[in-house]
Image (cartoon, rainbow, N blue to C red):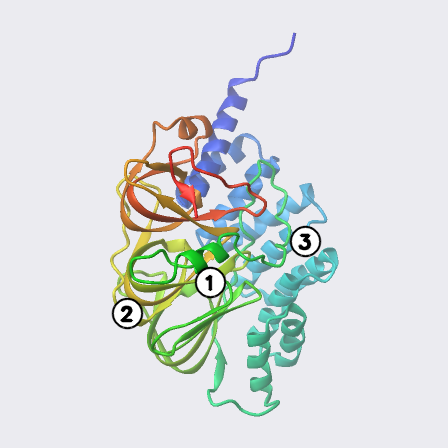
């Protein structure tokens, strides 16, 4: 007869699972508290170590994150993503020599992957070692950053706009979604969104239609242009005003001024004539053109906006007890957003509400009312926060690659 689990083990599982749930709901301080309690019971659990390191990083406790990633390597040796994550924490601490060693180790383990080259380029650029940075940016396929290095070196013809490298703050690899703390593998080359053709053909971008998900580029009526390079680098060229996610901004070109948004500390208000270059590591970029519509976008998914959308940003909405913090946009212009998987549009019809995982919601538009679906069977069974959408409108979802998406059991249908 097997022994019953000890009360201590039950307490450990409670704090471990609750800590991860808090993390996935972006409640990082609460996640840290629970995960630290779990670690005090068992300090050798790789799952707890991984999520605690991620929570430390999200709370800007980079020294603690670096130490925890280092400890985790003893249990999970040979994983390139852990070296990348530790290197990024060291980069944030301005310990660039140590960060470079971690990125080079990741490069050896990853067999020459793009991301270690990108981070090595950023490290060399911070130290004004532009030739070395150029080599790594070229290897990573980061053409815009490579172009900036060539301009710094005075190679080639000087462009009309003088480029400058902004202070760079790369992000750790995205949280893994399984119950094991295995690092996420580098993403494959982005594939076209499965709904793109149907959206572009049957739903033309008019004021009362759903926004198309654009994978490559979009040109606005005012001449502004947003282009996605390699699925991961977004370039926004404009005259006038733009908003940008501070953590995503890796470079700029032209005559631009920057200041923190008075409403949202995560955002920068940019004024002038030039281009912005934005990256959210581990995520793919998409562009949505708005023509008079209103769009609510989860703050962490927002990358940049221009046109009317740079001026009419509403106060971030907490939605009561909902685990969503969204920013409201309305008018004409273009919005860049980031996702871990495929961005899909899902239609919600009056009388046929949809219940969706809060961590998969990217944004929504139309006449929709939101409520927390605490009593939903899926929420009760999984412990994952769920949100109920009622009314008529569209919801943008972040769907992992390879997922089979069909009609929602509550009545919404994927376009």
List x then y, in percent, for residue 107.
Answer: 70, 61
State which tag comes first along the sequence, 2 or 3. 3
Tag in front: 1 or 3: 1
According to the image, label 3 marks what residue?
80
Can you see residue 98? no
State which tag comes first along the sequence, 1 or 3. 3
According to the image, label 2 marks what residue?
308
For disc 3, the neighbor class at 10 Å (few under 14, some 14 to 19, many from 20) is many
Q: Residue at x 63, y 52 (%)?
A: 81
Tag in front: 2 or 1: 1
Residue 237 against residue 370 in the figure, above or below:
below
List x then y, in percent, for residue 185.
Answer: 64, 50
Q: In which image quadrant can residue 359 be found? A: top left
Q: Assess whether mark 3 and mark 2 are in contact (beta carbons under 8 angstroms).
A: no
Q: Which mark is residue 214?
A: 1
Task: Using the numbered discs, state the Cα–Cα distance from disc 1 to disc 3 in whole angstroms.
Answer: 31 Å
Along the line of sight, which residue is nearer the eye, 407 or 146?
A: 407
Along the line of sight, which residue is nearer the eye, 243 or 33?
A: 243
């Amino acid at each position: 007869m097997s022994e019953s689990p000890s009360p201590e083990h039950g307490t450990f599982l409670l704090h471990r699972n609750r800590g991860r749930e808090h993390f996935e709901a972006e409640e990082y301080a609460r996640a840290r508290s629970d995960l630290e309690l779990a670690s005090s019971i068992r300090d050798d659990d790789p799952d707890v170590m991984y999520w605690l390191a991620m929570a430390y990083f999200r709370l800007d406790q980079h020294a603690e994150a670096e130490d925890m990633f280092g400890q985790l390597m003893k249990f999970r040796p040979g994983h390139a993503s852990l070296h990348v994550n530790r290197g990024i924490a060291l980069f944030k601490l301005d310990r660039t020599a140590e960060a470079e060693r971690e990125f080079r180790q990741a490069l050896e383990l990853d067999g020459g992957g793009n991301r270690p080259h990108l981070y090595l380029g950023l490290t060399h650029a911070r130290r004004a070692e532009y030739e070395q940075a150029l080599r790594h940016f070229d290897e990573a396929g980061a053409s815009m950053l490579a172009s900036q290095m060539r301009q710094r070196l005075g190679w080639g013809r000087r462009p009309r706009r003088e480029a400058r490298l902004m202070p760079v703050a790369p992000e750790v690899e995205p949280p893994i979604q399984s119950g094991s703390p295995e690092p996420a593998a580098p993403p494959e080359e982005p594939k076209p969104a499965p709904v793109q053709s149907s959206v572009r053909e049957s739903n033309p971008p008019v004021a009362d239609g759903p926004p198309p998900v654009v994978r490559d580029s979009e040109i606005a009526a005012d001449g502004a242009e947003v282009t996605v390079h390699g699925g991961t680098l977004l370039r926004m060229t404009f005259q006038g005003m733009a908003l940008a996610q501070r953590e995503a901004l890796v470079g700029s070109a032209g005559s631009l001024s920057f200041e923190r948004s008075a409403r949202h500390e995560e955002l920068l208000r940019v004024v002038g004539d030039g281009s912005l270059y934005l990256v959210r590591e581990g995520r793919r970029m998409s562009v949505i053109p708005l023509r008079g519509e209103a769009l609510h976008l989860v703050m962490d998914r927002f990358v940049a906006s221009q046109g009317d959308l740079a001026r009419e940003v509403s106060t971030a909405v907490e939605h009561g007890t909902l685990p969503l913090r969204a920013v409201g946009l309305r008018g004409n212009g273009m919005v860049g957003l980031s996702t871990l998987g495929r961005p899909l549009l899902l239609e919600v019809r009056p009388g046929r509400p949809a219940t969706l995982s809060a961590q998969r919601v990217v944004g929504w538009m139309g006449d929709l009312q939101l409520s927390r679906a605490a009593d939903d069977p899926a929420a009760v069974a999984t412990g994952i926060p769920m949100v109920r959408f009622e009314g008529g409108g569209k919801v943008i979802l972040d769907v992992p690659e390879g997922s089979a998406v069909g009609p929602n059991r509550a009545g919404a249908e994927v376009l």
